Amino acid sequence: MMDLKGTKTEKNLLEAFAGESQARNKYTYFASVAKKEGYEQIAAIFLETADNEKEHAKRALRYLQGIGNTAENLKAAASGENYEWTDMYKRFAAEAREEGFEEIARFFEATGAVEAEHEKRFLALLKNLEEGKVFKKDQPVRWRCRNCGYIHEGTEAPEVCPACVHPRAFYEVAAENY
């Protein structure tokens, strides 16, 4: 494919991606309202349309070469989250405060704090991936099958879940927060 950099087509793809992404989120919120108000069919149509919009956004992002392998995607995600918490939300909070919107400034600050945690999580996952430690740990841990809940203890997740026969890809380190 020809290089899109700096073309109107690149600008249009970016606008399409943003518009389709925003529409998808809006429609999922609208579906929740319709469901709460007792309109199951309308909720289902909002959700179906949201799924359609997701596919449109994905196609635009692929043209922009914005979807890579998992390591590349984790790096891109961490970079985006870093920008959001170190620049964007700090700037937004300051501007909201200047204009007298204190509650909105606090919202931007709180959201920025969440984005910092997102960056941290993506970087930790990237490190695990690069070091071959997604399904292997140095010390024994409790692994949980995300499909059926089976618990395995050891330094590695099983290749196949003995309870539901799903592959290793369905395992995560079991985290108990109760």
Image (cartoon, grey):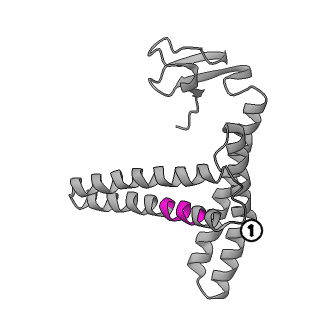
Q: Is residue 70 left or right of residue 160?
A: right
Q: Is residue 78 magenta?
A: no
The residue located at (75%, 25%) in the rendering is 132
The residue located at (71%, 71%) in the rendering is 90
Which x, y percent locates residue 7? 68, 66
The residue located at (28%, 51%) in the rendering is 44
Depth check: 157 or 5 in front? 5
- The residue wearing badge 1 is 87
Which x, y percent locates residue 14? 60, 63
Give neighbour class at mark 1: few <14, some 14-19, many 20+ (Cα, 10 Å).
Answer: few
Q: Is residue 14 left or right of residue 119?
A: left
Q: How many marks?
A: 1
Circle 1: residue type: Asp
Which x, y percent locates residue 62? 60, 49
Q: Determine the image quadrant of residue 69.
A: top right
Depth check: 98 or 88 in front? 88
Outermost residue, bottom side: 99
Which x, y percent locates residue 58? 53, 50
User: Could you tell me what secondary structure mostly forms the magenta stretch?
Assistant: helix
Depth check: 144 or 14 in front? 14
Outermost residue, front side: 2
Q: Is residue 116 left or right of residue 13?
A: right
Please determine whether, in this image, residue 15 is positioned above or below residue 165: below
Magenta range is 14-21
Q: Secondary structure at mark 1?
A: helix
Please determine whether, in this image, residue 95 is positioned above or below residue 52: below
The residue located at (58%, 61%) in the rendering is 13
